[in-house]
Each structure stands twice: as structure tokens, then as C-alpha cells.
């Protein structure tokens, strides 16, 4: 059987982290002093949750947060268009500073308020179905995420999800290789992987990876996706992953 690998995203695919991302963003933007100062019952957070699907990397929160304020003032605002315009007119120097503050705020929360920080994160349905499969086939499973690797490993350990540490690639690898496409291409070349499956909720990552030979891209529609396409297809995706690991055919979804 050809050598196979499953590449999985983290936020929105395995774990619901929207509360944590909001708290960290608020502190990184000096809108709150710490987690206790963030109101997760506010309309502001509810709009943030609705627009979370626009974000692909941590620096994007720098542009999303002002958009949340605008959307609250004008509910008719086309958020997707406004976000695209903000990104096109981006100021990399500013959002890079923000990203550094974002990861630093998360690190401080994780180290000083670990239990509170972890309480903001919840496993999604796919995790329970995958736990045994990953344990039995750990060499075939990779995490490809824009999240910082330290927090990923901490969460995986807390929820007993047994990825090999060397198969977890986070924000440092993403920064070094510029895209998930480049990371996956490097892994398939270095590990001599002949066939692969990639599950992500962020459509742009999946579209980019369509250029990789013998890779099946599947969108996690239960994750952070536009409201009009959101649905829980996790049972189907879990079966696809099981079939793929067993060498059976999987229907391309994208």
C-alpha cells in the first residue's frame, strides 16, 4: 500500500478556541488587562465569533477586531469585503508587532493562569473519534497549524490526544515556509509520502493545496466557516479518514 499521511488543522478542526483567541486578542490590543477583564457574554464577542471564519493566521486578528467594532455600529456592513480591503491595505510592521504581543500574551496566560486558559478551549467532536486511530497510527498523522507549537502540545497533552511531537508543526514552521502548502510539500517529499489527506476549515489553505499531487482536501464545515455553509460533517470526515488510513478510496470533497 502506498505510504499515506493525514494532515490536520488544529483550531476549528480539533478544538474550539474562539473564546481563547478573543481573550488573547483583547489583551494584545490593550483592550483588557487580563482574561478576567474580558466579557464573553458581550455582543462584541458574539460578533467576533460570527466573523472568526475570516482569520487564517494570528496577525489577522489585528484587522478583525476593528471590524467587529464597525459591525456593531453598522450591522449591514459587508464584513468579508471590509476585511479583504483591510488586508489589501495592510501595514505589516504593525500587525507583526501585534502578532508578537498576541503570542506573548498567550504564553503568559498559559503559564500563569493555566487552568483558566485551558477552560476557554474545548475539544470538538472529531477528537473523540480520532483519539484511538491516532494512537494506533501516530506516524501517519500530522498537525499543520498557524498556532504556536507550545500551546498546541499543551492542549494535546491535557486532552490526551497522542500526536508525535515531531509531527506537530506550528507558527514557527509556518513563518519559515510561508504557507501550509509549502510545509505539506516538504513533508511529503522528505517523508516520501505518496498519498495524503488534508482537513482544514480555512478554505484558502485547502485551495492552495489543490496543486499537490495525490492529496485529498476536505473542508471541516463544523469549524470556523461562513454561516451559509456551516454544517456538522464531522462524522463523514471521520469515516473518510478511517477509510484513507485503511487504504480505501475517499471521495474528493473540494
Image: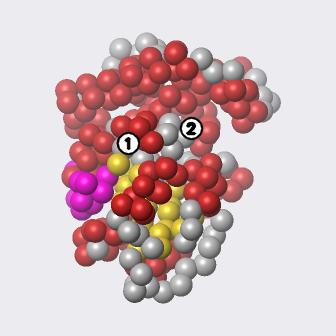
Q: List x then y, in percent, for residue 167.
A: 30, 57
Task: Indicate which disc, 1 or 2, sits on the residue closer to the N terminus.
Answer: 2
> Of tags 1 and 2, which is closer to the observer?
1
Q: How many C-alpha atoms fall within 10 Å of the one at disc 1: few (<14), some, or many (≥20)?
A: some
Q: Is residue 29 above or below residue 248?
A: above
Residue at 49%, 50% (x, y): give it: 182
- Label of residue 55 in the image: 2
Task: Give residue 101's quadrant in the image.
Answer: top left
Q: Is residue 111 above or below residue 206?
A: above
Residue at 33%, 19% (x, y): give it: 34
Residue at 44%, 17% (x, y): give it: 97
Task: Give residue 191's quadrant in the image.
Answer: bottom left
Q: How many C-alpha atoms fall within 10 Å of the one at disc 2: few (<14), some, or many (≥20)?
A: some
The residue that disc 1 covers is 173
Nearest the eye: 128 or 182: 182
Q: Which residues are magenta?
A: 158-168
Residue at 42%, 63% (x, y): give it: 188
The answer to whether any part of residue 16 appears in the image is: no
Quadrant that contains the N terminus: bottom left
| Image-based side of 139 in relation to 48, left or right | left
Residue 162 in the magenta stretch? The answer is: yes
| Image-based side of 114 in relation to 253, left or right | left
- Label of residue 114 in the image: none
Q: List x then y, in percent, for residue 204.
A: 62, 48
| Image-based side of 159 in relation to 122, left or right | left
Label 1 sits on a secondary structure element that is: helix
Amino acid at each position: 500500500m502506498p505510504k499515506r499521511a493525514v494532515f490536520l488543522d488544529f483550531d476549528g478542526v480539533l478544538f474550539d478556541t474562539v473564546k481563547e483567541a478573543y481573550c488573547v486578542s483583547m489583551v494584545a490590543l490593550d483592550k483588557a488587562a487580563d482574561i478576567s477583564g474580558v466579557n464573553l457574554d458581550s455582543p462584541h464577542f458574539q460578533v467576533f465569533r460570527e466573523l472568526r471564519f475570516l482569520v487564517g493566521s494570528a496577525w489577522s486578528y489585528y484587522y478583525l477586531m476593528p471590524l467587529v467594532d464597525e459591525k456593531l455600529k453598522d450591522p449591514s456592513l459587508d464584513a468579508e469585503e471590509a476585511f479583504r480591503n483591510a488586508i489589501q491595505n495592510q501595514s505589516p510592521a504593525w500587525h507583526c508587532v501585534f502578532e508578537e504581543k498576541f503570542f506573548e500574551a498567550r504564553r503568559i496566560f498559559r503559564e500563569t493562569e493555566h487552568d483558566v486558559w485551558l477552560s476557554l478551549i474545548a475539544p470538538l467532536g472529531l477528537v473523540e473519534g480520532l483519539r484511538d486511530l491516532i494512537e494506533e497510527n501516530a506516524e501517519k498523522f500530522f498537525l499543520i497549524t498557524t498556532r504556536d507549537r507550545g500551546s498546541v502540545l499543551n492542549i494535546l497533552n491535557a486532552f490526551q490526544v497522542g500526536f508525535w511531537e515531531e509531527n506537530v508543526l506550528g507558527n514557527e514552521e509556518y513563518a519559515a515556509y510561508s504557507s501550509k502548502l509549502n510545509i505539506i510539500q516538504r513533508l511529503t517529499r522528505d517523508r516520501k509520502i505518496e498519498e495524503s489527506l488534508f482537513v482544514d476549515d480555512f478554505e484558502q489553505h485547502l485551495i492552495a493545496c489543490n496543486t499537490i499531487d495525490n492529496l485529498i482536501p476536505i473542508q471541516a464545515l463544523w469549524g470556523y466557516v461562513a454561516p451559509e455553509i456551516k454544517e456538522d460533517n464531522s462524522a463523514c470526515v471521520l469515516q473518510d479518514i478511517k477509510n484513507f488510513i485503511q487504504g480505501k478510496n475517499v471521495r474528493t470533497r473540494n
